[in-house]
Image (cartoon, grey):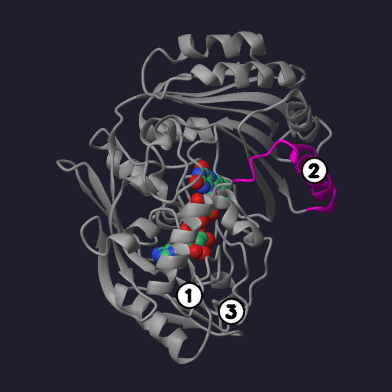
Amino acid sequence: MLTYRPGDPGYDEHRLGWQRAFDPRPALIAAAETTDDVRTAVLTARERDLPLAVQATGHGMIVPADGALLLKTTALTGIEIDPRRRTARVGPGTVWADVNRAAARFGLAGLAGRCSTVGVTGYTLGGGQSWLSRTFGFAADSVVSADVITADGDELTASEHEHPGLFWALRGGGGNFGLVTSLEFRLYEVPRVFSGMSFHPIERAFDVLDAYRKWALDEPEAMNTAVLLLRLPPSGHRVLAIRAFHLGDDGRRILAPLLEAAGPPLLDTFEMRSFPQASDATNGPDAPPMAVRQEIEMFHDLPDEALHAIVEAGAPDSPSAFVELRHWGGAMAHGDGPAGHRDVPFSVMAVAPGLPAADIVLDRLVARLDPYRSGGSFLTLLTDPARTATAFTPQNYARLAAIKRVWDPTNFFHLGHNIPPEDPK
Ligand SMILES: Cc1cc2nc3c(=O)[nH]c(=O)nc-3n(C[C@H](O)[C@H](O)[C@H](O)COP(=O)(O)OP(=O)(O)OC[C@H]3O[C@@H](n4cnc5c(N)ncnc54)[C@H](O)[C@@H]3O)c2cc1C
């Protein structure tokens, strides 16, 4: 295991993650090279009474690991695909791009998200909303088993049959319950996907959002979509974009009412692709490390006032990077794990550079949406640690806190979205 203390060469390189909104100063960085190193790091943090932070990529950094032992799992990559059982097993440092490529060789795909450099484990433990989630559910719903190092340093496997309470909590409860050293999850047969984006003049924004909220009510489960008000690099030109990911070759027919509302496109990239190509085409280039602020709110209904707020936050002179209205539901409604709000169909997500001018726009968006939001969120997309509980239904949150009391009564795993153990009665 490689270790770095403040002042060591390599300390600065290893302490930073993708999210540059923080400037973390860990007391010690442990870059694991084996699973044993992970266990050693857990035991070392306990012995020295250091808080423990874990990082694969740093995409999900929401609190800085100041004064902590920062365990880096980045080097623990590795993928085994079992094409017969249609499963993948990955190391804790594995990122989605590698799974996408490895699974595609067998015509299979995992439930990857919008950025292929995101870590599979952190994403999945937090629920994981994929371009295929309306079709196959949350990524967490597809977990088959997890190898875990507990807060006491014990190594165990959690699955439907072994430690079922812990297994339930791992499928959406985030990094609260143990350090996952290996994750096994289901893959799906996805040989070709209708995917891409169409770009339209930003002036069409309100009409398309209006058409989308109505069209979405009949969206088939095979279709996954979002409407974005987006700044296009490198010009910064602001456009309206329709994104789609559909399992079937009739995507254009299904999207027709939306495309009609949007009018003639500036550019249309929809076509049938392999899953890794589809992922790239729908997401665009992966963003480099940066300081971002992100807001996520969920909605049962979207009145005109909410749509006007979205249009304003995505206006041509707005500093936001994008504002997205996305329709969920479908297969996401059926899982039994703690992930998400399965009955809330819409989310609005806004992402902006961490700048004062952008803060003003996002604060105003949040204030304007406030009367209409459900109060819920998605854990992986939530960056405010004070709102962790909003990612769960009250029943699921209470159950997670009870399971936390069993597996981590001292709240050792707390740096991140924290679910404190329930108070002993
Ligand atoms: C550009 C971008 C695009 C994204 N797109 C999506 C998307 O489409 N859908 C979606 O759902 N989310 C998305 N996310 C959010 C992403 O899923 C979360 O940020 C997630 O936490 C990232 O996991 P990571 O391991 O890459 O990040 P890290 O910062 O390395 O880890 C984040 C947290 O995950 C937990 N964790 C990581 N590894 C382990 C482990 N081995 N054991 C226990 N806990 C662990 C810890 O709590 C850790 O603090 C996106 C984020 C970004 C920045």
Q: Earlier in the sequence, mark 2 or mark 3?
A: 3
Left/right placement of residue 73 relative to residue 374 reads: left
Instruction: Indicate which disc residue 88 carries.
Output: none
Crowdedness near tag 1: few (<14), some (14–19) or many (≥20) residues, C-alpha within 10 Å = few
Q: Label 3 sits on what residue type?
A: Pro
As drawn, which residue projects farthest toward the left? Answer: 84
Residue at numbered disc 1: 425
Q: Is residue 104 above or below residue 398?
A: above
Q: Is residue 127 visible?
A: yes
Magenta residues, as a range? 355-376
**Of helix, strand and loop, which one carries label 3?**
loop
Q: Position of residue 126 (x, y in %)?
A: 47, 54
User: Which residue occupies 48% across, 20% down?
Assistant: 219
Q: Label 2 sits on what residue type?
A: Ala
Instruction: Indicate which disc residue 26 carries.
Output: 3
In the picture, the quarter occupied by the N terminus is: bottom left
